[in-house]
Structures are given as structure tokens and as C-alpha cells.
Image: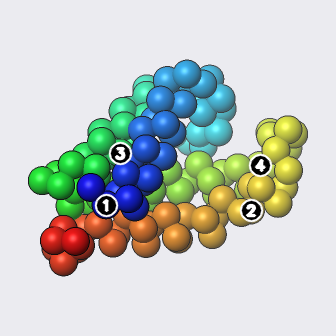
Amino acid sequence: MRFGRFVMGTLYVAAGIGHFMFTRFYANIMPAYLPLHRDLVLISGAAEIAGGIGVMIRPTQQSAAWGIVLLLIAVMPANVWMVQHPERYPGVPLWALWMRLPLQLPLLWWAWRYTRPEVLSK
């Protein structure tokens, strides 16, 4: 197994578990305009776990990586929401809220790399 896929998979599994352990925290960062915060947190946590496991398994690597790409796009509104409403997160430094936005780009690129067929053969 490629080291990069193992690291990526482990990070997403850990992040997904965090959604179940700290559901209330994640629900608090959900944009107010979205319904069913708790349910969406649990669904996204399960998706992260599935994507993390899937990217580590060669036959499912490509589809799991596409799932991670879509998940990263889907959670972007929460990152934007936090920057727009920093007063709701007094324990999080403003610079950290802003850093989450550009951090999505390398995460998207990393996942996208595993969607390409030529990466499957390495």
C-alpha cells in the first residue's frame, strides 16, 4: 500500500471518528441555514470514515478518492460560515479560521491525485 494513501486514509478515519465523539462541536460549526445539524455531522463523519478506508484499499481507491473530493467541497460552507461568524467561536483564533479556507486546496489536490487511473498502478 502506498504510504500516502495510508496517511490520507488514517487522517480521514480519525476525522470521521471525531464527528461521532464531538458531535456537538461539529454541529455548532454548521451554517444556520442548513437543517438537521446533528444528522449532517453524523453523515459526514460516516462518509469520512468510508472514504478513509476506501482510499486505502486499491480496488476502491479511485471511487473513495472522488468521494473525499466531493466531501471536501460539501463541507466548505462550514469553513466559510466560521470565517463569517468568528464571534461564535471565541476559542478559535481568527487566523485559524482563515487558514481552513486555503487548506482545502491541498487537501482537494491530494485526494484528486488518487482519482487518476495512473496513480492506481503505483
Q: How is the image coloured?
A: rainbow
Distance (Cα) linking label 3 and label 2: 25 Å
Please say if the residues under marks 4 and 2 sit with CB atoms less than 8 Å apart: no
- Mark 2 is on which residue type? Trp
- Mark 1 is on which residue type? Arg
Q: Which mark is residue 85?
A: 4
Q: Secondary structure at mark 2?
A: helix
Q: Nearer the viewer, mark 1 or mark 2?
A: 1
**Front residue (pair 49, 122):** 122
Q: Return the disc, 3 or 2, that comes first in the chain's sequence.
A: 3
The C terminus - image quarter: bottom left
Q: Could you classify mark 4 by the number of other residues whose Cα lies within 10 Å: few (under 14), some (14-19), or many (20 or more)?
A: few
Residue 40 x/y as whole percent: 44, 33
- Mark 3 is on which residue type? Gly
Q: Secondary structure at mark 4?
A: loop
Distance (Cα) linking label 3 and label 1: 14 Å
Q: Residue at x 82, y 60 (%)?
A: 95
Q: Residue at x 63, y 69 (%)?
A: 102
